[in-house]
Image (tube, helix red, strand yellow):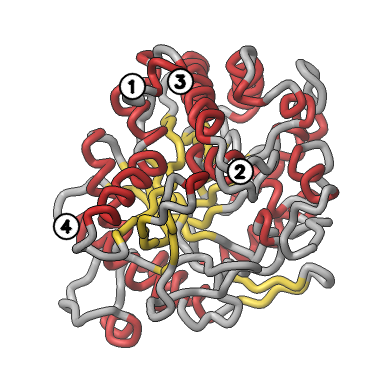
Amino acid sequence: MWGVATSAHQVEGGNENNQWFEWERAGGIKSGDSCGQACDWWTNAERDFNLAQQIGVNALRLSIEWSRVEPVPGRFDQSALDRYRRMLEDLRRRAIIPIISLHHFTNPLWFENEGAFLQAHAVQHFTRYCSRIIEEFGDLCSHWVTFNEPNVLAALSYVVGEFPPGKRGQIVPAVRLIYGMARAHAAAYATIHRLQPQAQVGWAHHYVAFDPASIHSLSDRWTTRVVDYLFNESFLRLVETGHGGFPFDLLFGDAADVSGTCDFVGLNVYSRFHVAFAPSLISQLCARIFVPEHVPQGDRGVHQPYGEAYPAAIRAAVTRVARLNKPIYILENGVPDARDRIRPWLIVNAVNEIRQLVEQGHDIRGYFHWTLTDNFEWSEGWHLRFGLIGLDPKTQERILRPSAYIYGEIARSNRLSPEMIAQYGGEALATNSSL
């Protein structure tokens, strides 16, 4: 699959019944922007589906906004479900395969106010919602992503404070959230397979390459291992083994039923960060995580660099999750780049990493670029532009960036051309670069 990835809150517009709308009203968006109508998908997603078809992708990852379809507990909005059905049918008519994310960072307000995935009835609520979605759309979709980036949601909600509820340095609630989402994932996995036995179910795992600031510093190396373990390994280890390690299993209980609950592993891979031991940063586990100025980067965030653009992180991520012996999809990869100065380089080199990994025997079945159209980038607002298509959110005017044509050529031909490699490749490659 050659696809693009999106999420409901970032593209639909008008989502006013989830915790992100409340976070925006409370001033939580660093840029001061408003999501507003976003990319106007709720009334006219088909406009961007036209452009996706024009570019030449054959798959599109989108999410269902839980707060739209279940605005109050146990009561589903059929008109919202009907709108999603029309969107999925339109994708199918265009020969674009939909992959549906069931949860992409947003909670209905009623669920958030109960404590979301920290509360006892979270699994029951989530599986009820998942059951209805599979019953409604199982004829149109067979690939399901239960959760997008549980590790990011936990870290940014309870450690860094950039996502609602905006807590900082609260490691225990962060790990507790991971366990809660893992149990909900396992229950959803069983529910989906009960309703759709041939379904393919996984989750989207955000993987970051962490390197010590100084390879010669024992404290930097140790701190890097701690950060890597807590971020990259937390949810992944629960799915792989059913255990989160000491002392977390002791604190949060048995998770053995989570083991093996995936038919594929989705990877969201963007960046590399460097880690230095900083004893004054106790709330951040004494870790200073930074991006050196000299490395390839996209546009900066409002307050800090977004991250090093690092195609080789795909190799590190694939090598790690290959231990699960499951098919792998790169479900997100991209760079914030309003002027398209580095995105063509990123796409070509990311695809080249995948080409080499496939040749080495890794079962990689899809690449999804983040994203199709510039969207509302969570706490960064409209400040970061990830789209193959540029968007003016005021006028809703769209302009295809040069990288859209580059990616489209790759998608249609299923290969990297020698010309692309010569112009954008990080190093000389053989001309036989077919995937």
In three-dimensional space, the C-alpha distance between marks 2 and 1, rounded to whole angstroms, equals 25 Å
Secondary structure state at the residue bearing disc 3: helix
Q: Is residue 56 left or right of residue 322?
A: right
Q: x and y percent of residue 134 in the render?
A: 59, 24
Q: What's under tag 4, amino acid-wise?
A: Glu
State the residue at coordinates (32%, 71%): 349
Q: Name the residue under label 1.
A: 243
Above or below, 433 against 372 in this view is: below
Pointer 1 and pointer 4: residues touching (CB < 8 Å)?
Answer: no
- Label 2 vs 4, first from the N-terminus: 2
- Label 2 vs 1, first from the N-terminus: 2
Q: x and y percent of residue 241 in the render?
A: 29, 23
Q: Which of marks 1 and 4 is in front?
A: 1
Q: Which of marks 2 and 3 is in front?
A: 2
Pointer 2 and pointer 4: residues touching (CB < 8 Å)?
Answer: no
Q: Name the residue under label 4.
A: 359
Q: Nearer the viewer, residue 62 or 311?
A: 311
In three-dimensional space, the C-alpha distance between marks 2 and 3, rounded to whole angstroms, equals 28 Å
Q: What's under tag 1, amino acid-wise?
A: His
Q: Which of marks 3 and 1 is in front?
A: 1
Q: Nearer the viewer, mark 4 or mark 3?
A: 3
Q: Residues within 10 Å of mark 3 (few under 14, many from 20)?
A: many
- Label 1 vs 4, first from the N-terminus: 1
- Label 2 vs 3, first from the N-terminus: 2
Q: Which of marks 2 and 1 is in front?
A: 2
